Amino acid sequence: MTGISLRALVMTTVTNPAEAARQLLALKLNRETLWLGLALAIVLNSLVHVVSNMLAPLQDPDLQVLAGSLVLYVVLAGGSLLLSIAAVFQVGRLLGGTGSFEDVMILMVWMQFFRVLVQVFSLILMLIMPGLFAVLAFAAALLMLYVVVHFIDQAHRFGSPLKALGVLVLSALAIAVIVIVLLSLVGGPMLGTPAYV
């Protein structure tokens, strides 16, 4: 990233996510670069996910096969990330935000790269201190929530992290509804049940 030290950006993301968001937005990356970054972030996240499942396999062998599938996780991660970007953009605009799709996208893409670093760090700590893994995972989840709320706030220029949190909650609900509808449409006929059930 031109003009930004990645190491400094990682530290700023942890200590002052609003400032990190402003630095990222100031880059004004073009759409092609953003889509390339999105694809790379999805692949890296998928690789880390598969490795973590190899190190800590699930009890159910059928679920473990699914969890260990790189292709399946790439598809799921890619779809969920695109849905998340679209939902945060649309819900934010409905609530008075002024961010563009690209503004939301660059911050969400950086969040994915940041997530990779957090996951890798968590995996290392899991190997060194397995007893503290649950606590560390909870702390990482809180950190990610803190960062994403400030990123949404900066993307839409709300000036209110509480409003940004509302966008996050409503976006999650919108995605859940979309997924349920899609599953009912696809799964209903296959399972011999009405699609509207």
Image: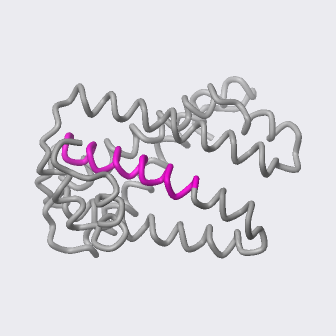
In the image, residue 103 sits, relative to residue 35, either above or below, namely below
Among the 4 quarters of the image, the one containing residue 128:
bottom right
Q: Nearer the viewer, residue 109 or 99?
A: 109
Q: Is residue 190 left or right of residue 148?
A: right
Way the structure is coloured: one colour
Give me the residue at 71% from left, 63% from top.
Answer: 126
Q: Is residue 26 left or right of residue 197?
A: left
On the rendered image, what quadrant is the N terminus found in?
top left
Q: Nearer the viewer, residue 147 or 48?
A: 48
Give me the residue at 72% from left, 39% from top.
Answer: 67
Q: Please state the horizontal and vertical placement of residue 77, each as a whole percent of the image.
A: 52, 38
Give me the residue at 47% from left, 34% from top.
Answer: 79
Q: Please state the horizontal and vertical placement of residue 134, each as a whole percent of the image.
A: 70, 71
Residue 112 magenta: yes
Give me the residue at 65% from left, 30% from top.
Answer: 70
Among the 4 quarters of the image, the one containing residue 159:
bottom left
Q: Please state the horizontal and vertical placement of residue 136, each as a whole percent of the image.
A: 62, 71
The residue segment tinted magenta is 101-120
Residue 169 magenta: no
Q: Please state the horizontal and vertical placement of residue 61, each as a whole percent of the image.
A: 88, 39
